[in-house]
Amino acid sequence: MITKQWMEIDNHRKIADHIWELTLKGTLVEQIERPGQFIHIKVDSSSDLLLRRPISISSFDKQEGWMKLIYRAQGEGTKRLSQKHVGDKVDVLGPLGNGFEIEKVEDHETVMIVGGGIGVPPLYELSRQFKMQNKKVTHVLGFQSRDVSFYQEEFSQLGLTFVTTVDGTEGTKGFVTDVMRKNIKDSDVIFTCGPTPMLHAIEETFSNHKRFISLEERMGCGIGTCLACVCKVNSDSSDTAYKKVCSDGPVFRGGEVIYG
Amino acid sequence: MITKQWMEIDNHRKIADHIWELTLKGTLVEQIERPGQFIHIKVDSSSDLLLRRPISISSFDKQEGWMKLIYRAQGEGTKRLSQKHVGDKVDVLGPLGNGFEIEKVEDHETVMIVGGGIGVPPLYELSRQFKMQNKKVTHVLGFQSRDVSFYQEEFSQLGLTFVTTVDGTEGTKGFVTDVMRKNIKDSDVIFTCGPTPMLHAIEETFSNHKRFISLEERMGCGIGTCLACVCKVNSDSSDTAYKKVCSDGPVFRGGEVIYG
Amino acid sequence: MMNIELPGLSLKNPIMPASGCFGFGKEFANLYDLSLLGAIMIKATTLEPRFGNPTPRVAETSSGMLNAIGLQNPGLEVVIETELPRLAQYDVPIIANIAGSTVADYVGISREISKQNNVKALELNISCPNVKTGGIAFGTDAQMAANLTKKVKEVSSVPVYVKLSPNVTNIVDIAMAVEEAGADGLTMINTLLGMRLDIKTAKPIIANKTGGLSGPAIKPVSIRMIYEVSQKVSIPIIGMGGIQTVDDVIEYFYAGASAVAIGTENFVNPFVCPELIESLPKRVKELGFDHINQCVGRNWKDERTSINRCP
Amino acid sequence: MMNIELPGLSLKNPIMPASGCFGFGKEFANLYDLSLLGAIMIKATTLEPRFGNPTPRVAETSSGMLNAIGLQNPGLEVVIETELPRLAQYDVPIIANIAGSTVADYVGISREISKQNNVKALELNISCPNVKTGGIAFGTDAQMAANLTKKVKEVSSVPVYVKLSPNVTNIVDIAMAVEEAGADGLTMINTLLGMRLDIKTAKPIIANKTGGLSGPAIKPVSIRMIYEVSQKVSIPIIGMGGIQTVDDVIEYFYAGASAVAIGTENFVNPFVCPELIESLPKRVKELGFDHINQCVGRNWKDERTSINRCP
Ligand SMILES: Cc1cc2nc3c(=O)[nH]c(=O)nc-3n(C[C@H](O)[C@H](O)[C@H](O)COP(=O)(O)OP(=O)(O)OC[C@H]3O[C@@H](n4cnc5c(N)ncnc54)[C@H](O)[C@@H]3O)c2cc1C
Ligand SMILES: Cc1cc2nc3c(=O)[nH]c(=O)nc-3n(C[C@H](O)[C@H](O)[C@H](O)COP(=O)(O)OP(=O)(O)OC[C@H]3O[C@@H](n4cnc5c(N)ncnc54)[C@H](O)[C@@H]3O)c2cc1C
Ligand SMILES: Cc1cc2nc3c(=O)[nH]c(=O)nc-3n(C[C@H](O)[C@H](O)[C@H](O)COP(=O)(O)O)c2cc1C
Ligand SMILES: Cc1cc2nc3c(=O)[nH]c(=O)nc-3n(C[C@H](O)[C@H](O)[C@H](O)COP(=O)(O)O)c2cc1C
Ligand code: FES
Ligand code: FES
C-alpha cells in the first residue's frame, strides 16, 4: 500500500563528500515489500521546489520501524534536505516501485551485485536479504574517487567486496566492468544500479547473464499516472508499448526496456 | 546605514494567541537610530514566499547587540517564521524608515502613546526612550480580546497604562478613543500606531493635538525604490506629490499624508 | 452545500482531477474511492495510440513544473473498450479530454466517445497544433477554435467544454468565439509554454525542448484570465492552474469559476482531491456562505469593471 | 571576460537593474557604488509627472509578485533636470525606459531624453495601452509596435531597444516586425498579466485589480520566448525575468540573451547586482568559457530547431 506519512528524522549524518545517510521512523516502513523500492520525499513545505524527490530505500527494519536513505546533496532539493535536523518531520510518499525480485534467483545460482556511485544505496538492503538467505554474493562498487565512496565496510561484512574508483584513490583504478570481467565466472545473476553509461556497458558485456537493472528517470508523480518516466519496451513492433520506471520498475530484467 | 545581515535567533517565544516575540542578535542593531524603525525580514531561503516582511523593531539594546520583534503569525510567511528555532539565522534588511522623532517633543510637553493590536510593538521602545528622558507618558493599548493582548505589564512599568478590549475580556470594554477622550487633557502630544480605522478616528477626534502616526502599507523593496508604498500628501494641488511609507515614514505628522 | 449543476454534469462537489494529471484513474483507485470525486477529466485521447515524446518529459521550475508528455495514450479504441468500462464501477461522471491534429480527428473521437455511458461531457484540448494550417494551435486563433467547436458540437451526444490555451494575446476573443460556436462551457487554463536549460550541458532539460508550465506559478495568470472571461461569457467555467488549498479553490470561484480541476498537485500530494473535498464545506461556512455557488464571480458581480492592462 | 558590446552600450559586465526595480538609482547609491553596474535601466519616464495607481500596488504570489505601480514618475522635465544629472556622477551608461499613451508621447520623450549625455540607449516600454486605438497595448500588435519603433527611430539620437510584452500569441512576429522597423535591440520580457484575490474580502489584493507578474515564476516563459526570438532576429536581446543567481544569468545567455537585467530580486536582495557581478566570472570559468559571450545562444547555435508547441 502506498502511504503518505510525516516521518521523523531519527538520525542524519554525512558519510562522504556531499553524501548523507538519513534514518526515518514511521509505520510506512511496514509497507515495504522488496529491496530496490524507493520513496518520494518532499524536502519541505515550501512550493518553490514543487516536486518530490525519488530516493531509494537503502535498508530498513520493520520490527524497529526505521528505514535508511543515502543521498547525494547536489541540487537545490537534496541540499535543503541535508539541512534537516534530527526530530524534524518530512513528508514521505511510499514505498514505490517493484524493487528487486530476489525470488527469481534459483537456489543454485550465485549473485554479483554491482553498484555505481549514488546507485549503490538500494543494493545494500538487497545484499542484506541475500545474506539472510545465506546466498553467496560478490559486490563490485564503483565510485568517482575516495572522497565520495561510502559503505565499503558495510558491504564487506556481507560478502566479498571489490571497490573501483575512476581516479584510483581507493581500490582498483578503473571501472566496475574491469573488475566484473575478472570475477564474473563465479556468478550467475547480476543485480545492478548506477549511472546509465555503466548500465549500458554491463548490458553489452554480460548480455548472456541473467540481469536485473535498476533505472533512474525524471519523475512527476512517482505512482504511475503522469507518464513522465516511461521507457520503450525492447523489440516492440507497434512502437507504443512502454514501461513506467516508477511503477513497473525501477528494476527491469536485462534487455527488457530501452533506456538512456 | 541599511545593512543586510544573517541575524541569529537568541530567543523566540509565544506571548499571546498567535503573537510571538523574537529576539535577534547581530551588529545590525548598531545602526538603529530611532524607535519606530522597522526591519525587512526574509522568512526562509525558499523563493515561494518571495518578498520580505516588514516588522517593527519593538525594543533594542545596542550595548548587548539585540533587538526584539513582536509579530502576529497569521499569513504564510509569519507562520513559517514562528517555526524557527533558537540558533537559526534569519536574513534581515534594516534598519528601515525614519521612526518616531522624539526630539520634536518639547521639554514641557507630556505624551500619550496609543497602540492598537499589532501596532503596539514599536511603541514599546518609544516609551522606553521617553522613560530614559524622565518624560511623563500615558499609554492606551487596545486589543481585540484578552487572548491576543500582550505587554501590559511591560508598559505599566514605564507609566500609567490603560487597556481596552473590544469584547471587554480585559481592561475597559470599547475602543482606545473612548479612554483617550477621558484622559487626553493631561497630554500634549499623541504617538500612535495601529489599524487604519483607529488611526482615522484619532486623527479626527484629536485633530488639534500634535500627532505622530505610524502607518502600514504593502511593500515591495522597503527602501524607497519601488513606489509600492506611497501615499498622497495632504492638500497638494498638483496631485502628484507623495510620500513613501517605507523611507519617508512609516511615521508621519498628523495630517501630513492621506492614507487608508 | 457543495453540489454543482453544470451542462451535462451533476457534480457532488466542485473538485475534479485535471486531464493528464490522473491518467485514467487506475493508480488513484488504489489510494482512495474515486466515487468521492466531483468528476474525472481523463487523459487526452487521440484516434490512434501514441507513445508521446522522448524523456526527460518533466522539469521543475520555481513553484511550477514543465511537462512535455506528448499526449501519450492508448488511443480511442482501448479507451472505449478498457478504460471507460473500468471507470464505470465508480459513481462519478467522466469528462473526456479530446486531442487531435485535424478537425476530422476531433470529430471522429468526439462522435464515438460521447456515446459512452459514463462520459457526461467532452473537453476539447485545443492547445494542439493543427497540421493542416502549418502547426498553429487550434486554441490560438479564434476562428479555428470556433470552427472546431462547431464541428464537434454537431456530432457530440453530450455537452462540449472547450479548454482554452493561455498562450494568446486576447483570451476573451477566443472564449466569445467558442461560446458563439456553441460551446456549453469552458475549462481554463491549459499550460503556459515554457523552457528550462541545464547549466552544465546548455541543453533543454526536457527532450522536447519546450514544455507546458503548470503549478502555483501560473495561478495569478489563470485567475486573471477567468476573471476577464467570466464577465464576457454566460457559459460556465471550470477553473484550474496551481490549485493546492481550499483557499485556492475559493479564489477561483471568486474570479468566476463554477467548479475547479486539480492538476499538478496530484503529483505532489496524491490525496489532494479527497482532502480538499473534505475541508471545503467548513471553509465555505467559515467565510459566511451557505453554498459554494454563492462564491461564483463574487469579485466582479457587484461592479463590472474593465481591466487596466498596463501595470 | 565580462565586457559586452551592444548597440550604443559598452558594458563592463552584462548585469544591469531592470526598469522600475531601481527607481533612478538614488536609494541604491547609498548601498553600493553604481559604477559597478553594467548599465542602469531607469524607471519609465512619461511626458508629464504621474502619481500612478492607488495602493495596494503589490501582492505576493508563489515565487512571484504582482505590481501595478502605474508608471509613477516625476515626468520628462524633472528626469532631465534632476535625475539624469545626478546619475552622471557614476561611470555607467543609462538606458532610458520610455512610456506613453500615444505615438506622439513616445516620440516627444525620446527626442529629448536621447540627447542627454549619459543616456546611451532607449528602451521602449510598449506594454502600455494606446489610447488612440481603444487601449490595446502597443506591444500586443505587430504593426502598432513596428510603427512606434519606426517613429521613435526617426528622432532618437541613440540606439533604440524595444521591450517586448509576453502577453501575446506570437512573440516572434512582434520581434521580427520591430527589427524590420529599425530596432537596434530587444529587451524581454515585461511582466505577465495576473491577478490575486483576497479570500476574506473577495476583492483583488491590488487596487488596480490586475498587475504585472514578475519574479522566478515567470523565468521559464521568458527563457522560452528568448530562445524562440533569438533564433529569428539578428539584433541582440537583453534578457530578464526572475533572475536571482549566476546560474539564472547563464541560462539566459544559453537561451540567446547578450546581457541581462535584474528586476524583482533587487527588492528581495538589494545587493544582488554587485553580488552577481562579483561571482559571475568564476562561474563562467568553471563552466569552461573564456568569456561570457561564448555562452550566447549556446543551446541553439549548433542545431536550429523549431518548437513543438503542444506539450
Ligand atoms: C528510482 C530512483 C531512485 C533514486 N535513488 C537515489 C538514491 O538512493 N540516492 C540519491 O542520491 N539519488 C537517488 N536518485 C536520484 C535523485 O532522485 C536525484 O538526485 C534528486 O531528485 C535530485 O534532486 P535535487 O533537488 O538535488 O536536484 P534538482 O536539480 O534541484 O532537481 C530538480 C528536479 O529534477 C529531478 N532530478 C534531478 N536529477 C535527477 C535524477 N538523477 N533522477 C531523477 N530525477 C532527477 C528532481 O527530482 C527534481 O524534480 C534516485 C532517482 C530515482 C528515479
Ligand atoms: C512598517 C510596518 C511595520 C510593521 N510592523 C509589524 C509588527 O511589528 N508586527 C506585526 O505583526 N506586523 C507588523 N506589520 C505587518 C506585517 O508586515 C504583516 O503582518 C506581514 O507582512 C504579513 O505577512 P504574512 O506572511 O503573515 O502574510 P501573507 O498574507 O502571507 O503576506 C503576503 C504579502 O502581503 C504582505 N502583507 C500582508 N499583510 C500586510 C500588512 N498588514 N502590512 C504590510 N504588508 C502586508 C506581506 O508582507 C507579503 O508581502 C508591519 C507592517 C509595516 C508596513
Ligand atoms: C503532466 C501533465 C499532463 C497533462 N496532460 C494534459 C492533457 O492530456 N490534456 C489537457 O487538456 N491538459 C493536460 N495537462 C494540463 C492540465 O490539465 C492543467 O490544465 C494544467 O496543468 C494546469 O493545472 P495545474 O496547475 O493544477 O496543473 C497536463 C498537465 C500536466 C502537468
Ligand atoms: C515594481 C515593478 C515596476 C516595474 N516598472 C517597470 C517600468 O516602469 N517600465 C518597464 O518597462 N518595466 C517595468 N517593470 C518590469 C521589469 O523591468 C521586468 O521586465 C520584469 O519585472 C521582469 O523581471 P523580474 O522578474 O526580474 O522582475 C517593473 C517591474 C516591477 C516588479
Ligand atoms: S513518474 Fe509519473 S508515471 Fe512515473
Ligand atoms: S516599499 Fe518600495 S518604495 Fe516603499
Image (cartoon, coloured by chain):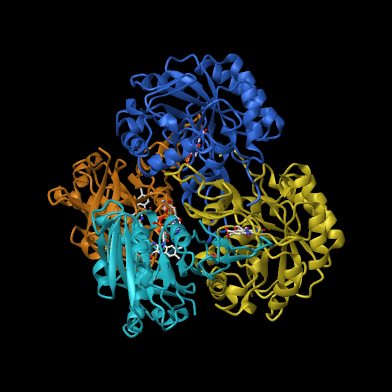
Chain colours: A cyan, B orange, C yellow, D blue
Name, please, the residue furthest toward the right: C154
**Image quadrant where one finds the N terminus of chain C:** bottom right
Quarter holding residue A31: bottom left
**Residue B95 higher or lower than A28, as above or below:** above
Relative horizontal placement of residue B57, taking residue D311 as reference (left or right) = left
Residue A83 seen in the figure = no
Residue D29 percent across, percent down from the top left? 32, 30
**Residue D212 higher or lower than B160, as above or below:** above
**Residue C211 higher or lower than C293, as above or below:** above
Residue A137 percent across, percent down from the top left? 34, 75
Taking depth in this image into account, of C143 and B32 the one nearest to the observer is C143
Relative horizontal placement of residue A232, taking residue C148 as reference (left or right) = left
Taking depth in this image into account, of C63 and C311 the one nearest to the observer is C63
Taking depth in this image into account, of D1 and B196 the one nearest to the observer is D1
- For the point 52% across and 36% down, which residue is it? D52
Residue B180 percent across, percent down from the top left? 33, 57
